[in-house]
Image (cartoon, rainbow, N blue to C red):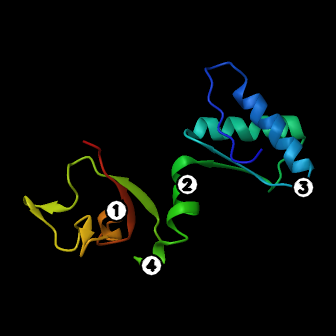
Amino acid sequence: MTNKLVLACAGAGKTERIIRESVEHIRSGRKVLVVTYTQNNQRELIHRFIQFNGEATIQFIVKGLYTFLLDDIVRPYQKCIFPKRIKTINFNKSGDPHKRNGRTIPGTAEKIDNRYNPKHYLTSCHAKPVFRTFPTK
C-alpha cells in the first residue's frame, strides 16, 4: 500500500479496507501511516486496528491532518526559519496577516528580490513560533 488515497461515501468500507490492508503490510514487515481529519476517525481507526490485529503496534501510526503537517512537513525544515520548535497551527480569520493598520509589515512580502520568502507563509508569533495558513480569495 504505497501512497494510497481512499475516497468513498459513508458505509462503503473504507475503514475496513484500510485496516485489513494495514495489517497485511505490517505482518510483512512494513510500517503504515494513516492520516485522517477528525479525532473521532483517529480513535475509530485505532480501535478497529486493535480489534482486527489483536493488539496495538508501533508500526501502525494514525495522525490527524494537522499533526501530520507539523510533524512531517513543517518541523523537519522549520529551523531554516525559526530557531525554536513550532508548537501549534493558528488559522488567521482576520484577513491579511501581513498587514498591520492597513500597511504591509516589512519582510513579509511573498517575494523578496524575486525569490519566494518563507516568512510570507510562516509567521512568528511574539510568544512562540506558529505555522499559519491564510484564507484563499
Horizontal and vertical percent position of residue 43: 67, 39
- For marks 3 and 4, give the CA distance: 34 Å
Q: Which amino acid type corresponds to the residue marked 2 in the rendered image?
A: Thr
Q: In this view, does 83 lie above or below 52?
A: below
Number of numbered discs: 4
Q: Mark 1 points at which residue?
A: 121
Residue 5, quarter of the rendered image = top right
Counting other residues with Cα less than 10 Å from the Cα at mark 3, is it few (<14), some (14-19), or many (20 or more)? few
- For marks 2 and 3, give the CA distance: 25 Å
Q: Name the residue under label 2.
A: 67
Counting other residues with Cα less than 10 Å from the Cα at mark 2, is it few (<14), some (14-19), or many (20 or more)? some
Q: In this view, does 63 lie to the left or right of 120?
A: right
Q: Identify which residue, 110 or 72, lies in the foreground.
A: 110
What secondary structure is marked by label 1?
helix
- For marks 2 and 4, give the CA distance: 20 Å
Q: Mark 3 points at which residue?
A: 29
Contact (CB < 8 A) between labels 2 and 3?
A: no
Which of discs 1 and 2 lies nearer the camera? The answer is: 1
**Taking the image as drawn, is residue 100 in sight?**
yes
Residue 10, quarter of the rendered image = top right
Counting other residues with Cα less than 10 Å from the Cα at mark 1, is it few (<14), some (14-19), or many (20 or more)? some
Q: Which mark is residue 80?
A: 4
Badge 3 or badge 1: first in the primary sequence: 3
- For marks 1 and 2, give the CA distance: 18 Å
Q: Identify which residue, 87 or 120, lies in the foreground.
A: 120
Badge 3 or badge 4: first in the primary sequence: 3
Q: Which amino acid type corresponds to the residue marked 3 in the rendered image?
A: Gly
Which of discs 2 and 4 lies nearer the camera? The answer is: 4
Badge 2 or badge 4: first in the primary sequence: 2
